[in-house]
Amino acid sequence: MSLVPAGFREGKPPCHYIPLNGQGDTIASLHQWSTSDEMETAVSEWLMNTIQKLELERTLRQSELEGVVPGKNVGQA
């Protein structure tokens, strides 16, 4: 639910209102004006970008927990 804008959390289904790209397209808006192939492409791109973002965040959190600073060699001050 954290990905759904607050004003749309009560919508049915709320996941249709998650912004998929920089233009703010959602499944609900794409359903109105795009083809099913265009909608599938937009959702696939959003999913891949979201997975990459979450994996990067997880890696950074893990590095912080281990005391490793990304981009610095071990032994550098």
Image: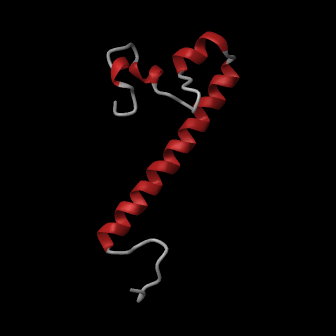
Quadrant position of residue 61: bottom left
Query: Residue drawn at (55%, 44%), measured in percent from left and top?
Result: 49
| Residue 58 position (above or below residue 69) | above
- Image coords of residue 62 (percent x, y): 35, 65
Using residue 20 as the reference point, say whether residue 69 is left or right of it.
Answer: left
Query: Residue drawn at (57%, 32%), measured in percent from left and top?
Result: 21
Quadrant position of residue 60: bottom left
- Image coords of residue 13 (percent x, y): 40, 17
Query: Residue drawn at (53%, 22%), measured in percent from left and top?
Result: 26
- Image coords of residue 30 (percent x, y): 60, 18
If the image is split into quadrants, where does the N terminus sit?
top left
If the image is split into quadrants, where does the C terminus sit?
bottom left
- Image coords of residue 24 (percent x, y): 54, 26
| Residue 65 position (above or below residue 30) | below
> What residue occupies the far front of the structure in this picture?
77
> What residue occupies the far bottom of the structure in this picture?
75
Using residue 56 as the reference point, say whether residue 63 is left or right of it.
Answer: left
Using residue 5 as the reference point, say whether residue 20 is left or right of it.
Answer: right
| Residue 45 position (above or below residue 19) | below
Query: Residue drawn at (60%, 35%), measured in percent from left and top?
Result: 44
How many numbered circles are shown?
Answer: 0
> What residue occupies the far left of the structure in this picture?
65
| Residue 66 position (above or below residue 4) | below
Quadrant position of residue 31: top right
Instruction: Specify the color scheme.
Output: secondary structure
